[in-house]
Image (cartoon, rainbow, N blue to C red):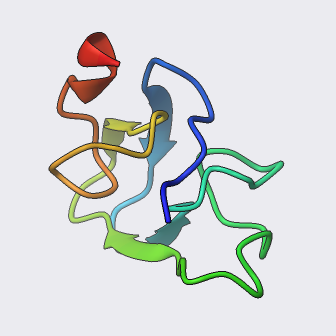
């Protein structure tokens, strides 16, 4: 099963050190880039990502990154 492309660019998110985030892997969430349970009944599960420091990170919006939850530029090839 192929994930839906939520957008062809990353989501810039200010994360907090010590906090965990659940990235949407299916592309169907209405709360992008995070999971809202829209994957239920599919083979997709959210990906847990934990912040080690407070900073801005770029979560994958195309759902095809080779780095899991974080953008690796794959959206430029779609």
Quarter occupied by residue 59 = top left
Please give the name of the residue rendered at 56% of the width and 35% of the height, measured from the top-left corner.
Answer: 5
Marker count (numbered): 0
Is 39 positioned to the left or the right of 3 in the image? right
Is residue 1 shown above or below 76? below
> Does 38 sit above or below residue 28?
below
Q: Position of residue 26 (x, y in %)?
A: 58, 60
Quarter of the image where the C terminus is located:
top left
Q: Position of residue 68 (x, y in %)?
A: 26, 58
Residue furthest to the front:
1
Residue depicted at 76% across the width and 84% down the height: 40
| Residue situated in front as seen by the camera: 59 or 56 | 59
Instruction: Name the foreground residue: 17 vs 23.
Output: 23
Residue at x 32%, y 71% (from the top left corner): 50
23 above or below 15?
below
Q: Quadrant of residue 32?
A: top right
Q: Position of residue 38 (x, y in %)?
A: 79, 69
Horizontal arrangement in the rendering, residue 49 relative to residue 40 (left or right): left
Q: Position of residue 17 (x, y in %)?
A: 34, 63
* 50 on left or right of 47: left
- Which of the 4 image quadrants contains residue 20? bottom left
């Amino acid at each position: 099963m192929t994930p839906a492309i939520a957008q062809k660019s990353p989501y810039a998110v200010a994360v907090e050190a010590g906090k965990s985030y659940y990235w949407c892997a299916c592309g169907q969430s209405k709360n992008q880039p995070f999971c809202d349970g829209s994957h239920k009944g599919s083979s997709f599960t959210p990906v847990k990502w934990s912040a080690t420091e407070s900073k801005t990170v770029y979560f994958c919006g195309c759902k095809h990154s080779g780095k899991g939850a974080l953008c690796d530029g794959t959206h430029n090839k779609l």
